[in-house]
Image: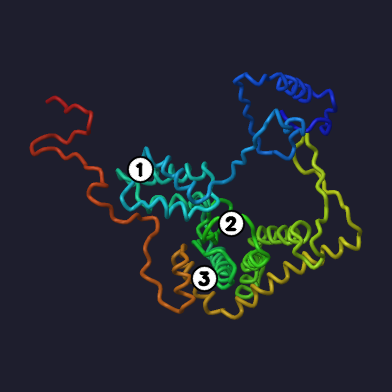
Amino acid sequence: MGRHRGAGLGGGHDEREQTLNQLLVEMDGFESNEGVILIAATNRPDVLDPALLRPGRFDRRVVVSRPDVRGREEILRVHTRKIPVSDDVDLPVLARGTPGFSGADLANMVNEAALSAARQNRKTVLMWDFEQAKDKVLMGAERKSMLLSDEEKRVTAYHEAGHALVAAMREHSDPLHKVTIIPRGMALGVTMQLPIDDKHTYTRDYLETRLAIMMGGRVAEELFLNTMTTGAGNDIEQASDLARKMTCEFGMSSLGPITFGKKEEQIFLGREISQHRDFSEETAQKIDAEVRRFVDDGYNSARHILESNRPILETIAMALLEREVIDANEVQLIIEGKELPIKVNPNVPPPAKDDDVQQVLKPAPGQPNVAPGERPAQA
């Protein structure tokens, strides 16, 4: 309702603009002794009309961002207050392991953990349930019904092993969390990384590392399978988009700290329609060359890491084919050349205590076996 006037497709006689004009008139009628507080919220402050933001209408702006680690811990306390949690549940650990989660994500995670405990017929929610729920929120639900051929599994294993090995070897990458070739969401496999703490700014070294990790999957396919698949399509798209932002928005290329391209947004539609080119054709060629250089540097870095560690990547891929899921500790053991521990089914919870298991009603000797709430049949 508070979008910028005069910039929409409907012109000045748009009903929305007339509503905003009347709203602005009413907001000028407050007296200093009236106890009226006006509160409004938006997730698009960039398209608000300037008349709404002048002093006297809204005097204070409160930015509600994603919660930090302390905020996540308090949110988890609120959502776990009504469910019985086990003694091994450590909320500070969960808060540190969920950077970037919003309040809705945390509520969803607690709900999924409670459902997991209910499926196992347990009275309390274990830490294992929260870990399973966190993976489900982060990577999507497992599609166990999706059948993959042995060849597709092999391609996926080498692809994800490439991502994982580059992420483990590069210095400025986020720590690995888990690697899986079980289809989750829209992906056939996932290599998940979790940052140590909340990040608000990103260095050039970090972004160049991200480019190398994205290219790791395609490089692994070329080196070990002598083929290319469509599985790297999303990686290439994200890498190209990141390289263009590094060049045109972040000023990290050899072109210097200059922004190229001005977005033209139709306020009425609320989305970017086109991008105005405020640079010459010669500069456009330089931008394309810089984007290409960023992506090629990431590709060459990933290729160097994988060629130098061929036996390690082969071992990671074989472990994925055998176990389907490996975590960061197991990847580190493989890199160090150590034996992996005996496989434990991640879908089976740890043994519960006696008070965690619901007691099954057993009939007394000589009494018929009757379900709760039912009356025994009369002879």
Spatial distance from mark 2 to mark 3, Cα to Cα? 31 Å
Q: Position of residue 319 (x, y in %)?
A: 46, 70
Kindly identify which residue carries mark 3: 317
Spatial distance from mark 1 to mark 3, Cα to Cα? 34 Å
Kindly identify which residue carries mark 2: 199
* Label at residue 59: none
- Does residue 179 appear left or right of residue 200 in this picture? left
Q: Position of residue 311 (x, y in %)?
A: 53, 79
Q: Nearer the viewer, residue 347 or 369?
A: 347
Q: Nearer the viewer, residue 248 or 129?
A: 248
Q: Earlier in the sequence, mark 1 or mark 3?
A: 1
* 2 and 1 marks in contact (CB < 8 Å): no
**Mark 2, other Cα within 10 Å: few <14 / some 14–19 / many ≥20:** few
Q: Earlier in the sequence, mark 2 or mark 1?
A: 1
- Does residue 290 appear left or right of residue 324 in this picture? right
Q: Position of residue 97 (x, y in %)?
A: 47, 55
**Mark 3, other Cα within 10 Å: few <14 / some 14–19 / many ≥20:** many
Q: Residue at x 64, y 60 (%)?
A: 202
* 2 and 3 marks in contact (CB < 8 Å): no
Q: Amino acid at mark 2?
A: Lys
The answer to whether residue 204 is above or below residue 57 is below
Which-is-in-front pick, marks 2 and 1?
2
Q: Amino acid at mark 3?
A: Ala
Q: Position of residue 223 (x, y in %)?
A: 63, 75
Kindly identify which residue carries mark 1: 118
Q: Secondary structure at mark 2?
A: loop
Which-is-in-front pick, marks 1 and 3?
1
Q: Nearer the viewer, residue 113 or 50?
A: 50
Q: Residue at x 82, y 63 (%)?
A: 288
Q: Secondary structure at mark 3?
A: helix
